[in-house]
Amino acid sequence: MKNKLAILTDIHGNRSALTAVLDEIDKDKEIEHIYCLGDLVGIGYETNEVLQLLFSRNNISFVLGNHDEAILDIISGREPYSKGKEREHHKWITSHLDRKFIPYLTEIPTTLTKSYNGKIFLFVHYHLNEHNQFLSVDKEPASEKLDELYRTSNADIICFGHHHVVHHFKSKERLYLNPSSLGCYHKPLASYAIITIGEKGELTVTLKEVPYDNKEFLLGYNRLNVPDADYILKFFHGDQHLNYL
């Protein structure tokens, strides 16, 4: 029988966007599992609301994102990767985190491998170096580069996030998919993808954008004095909040 999976990533503390996507996924009874590719928190401020939604479900598997990792580093007293205003923002997020979610976050792995109808999937937040650290974002990605990067992998499909744009590359070696950020976009649309694996391993990818009302979420940045709000609203949300002032 065929398998149908939902792939989402980079929720970034945006509850309304996440709710819109989960509501749509729940209407499709053929979707058997959801894979969330990291950055559950950070940038957006609805940390506890997002984590409550995600961890209350039993049909989602996770991999750890760089923002999630930074929060765990701060909690553990380690130096996070972030500096300056980004570190201030991460500390603010951490200070508002409900501690009941820490055990869930600490159990999230860096990668996951699964097999469906003979096709091997690798799920990761972003490409890793030999030390299991995230590489810098490649702003000119190509299948040739990705094939070289994953030349030793036996995966047929590699699903990742982090770079907030769609990647949908098919090479002779494998399929690469990034459905784009669910929670950060310059329009009130939340992105995710559906992958269908046929009985003989044939693959179908459907990229989805779900409209949602982001007004209260965007206005909340300044209302709550979220650190670095002006930068976040401009570069991650395209200053859409100005439409609501």
Image (cartoon, helix red, strand yellow):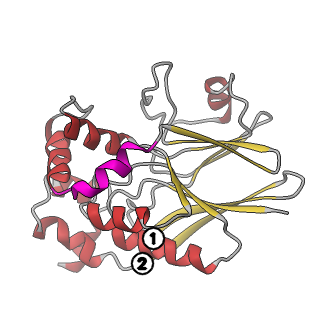
Residue found 27% across the figure and 57% down from its top: 100
Residue found 71% across the figure and 36% down from its top: 155
Label 2–label 1 contact, CB within 8 A: yes
| Quarter location, residue 143 | top right
Seen from the viewer's position, the closer of residues 198 and 150 is 198
Look at the numbered disc 2 and give the secondary structure of its residue.
loop
Tag shown at residue 60:
none
- Tell which circle, 2 or 1, labels the residue nearer the N-terminal end: 1
Q: Which residue lies furthest to the right in this view?
A: 200
What amino acid is at disc 2? Answer: Tyr
| Quarter location, residue 73 | top left
Residue 88, x across and y down, in percent: 13, 43
What amino acid is at disc 1? Answer: Leu
Relative to 89, is 17 above or below? below
Relative to 209, is 27 above or below? below
Seen from the viewer's position, the closer of residues 81 and 181 is 81
Relative to 126, is 196 above or below? below
Seen from the viewer's position, the closer of residues 56 and 195 is 56
Residue 70, x across and y down, in percent: 28, 39
Seen from the viewer's position, the closer of residues 234 and 50 is 50
Mark 1, residue position: 189
Q: How many marks?
A: 2
**Residues at marks 2 and 1, CA–CA distance in whole angstroms:** 6 Å
| Neighbourhood count class around disc 2 (C-alpha, 10 Å): few under 14, some 14–19, many 20 upward | some
Q: Give the range drawn in magenta.
A: 96-108
Tell me the quarter of the image containing the N terminus: bottom right
Relative to 161, is 132 above or below? above
Residue 160, x across and y down, in percent: 54, 44
Look at the numbered disc 1 and give the secondary structure of its residue.
strand
Mark 2, residue position: 212
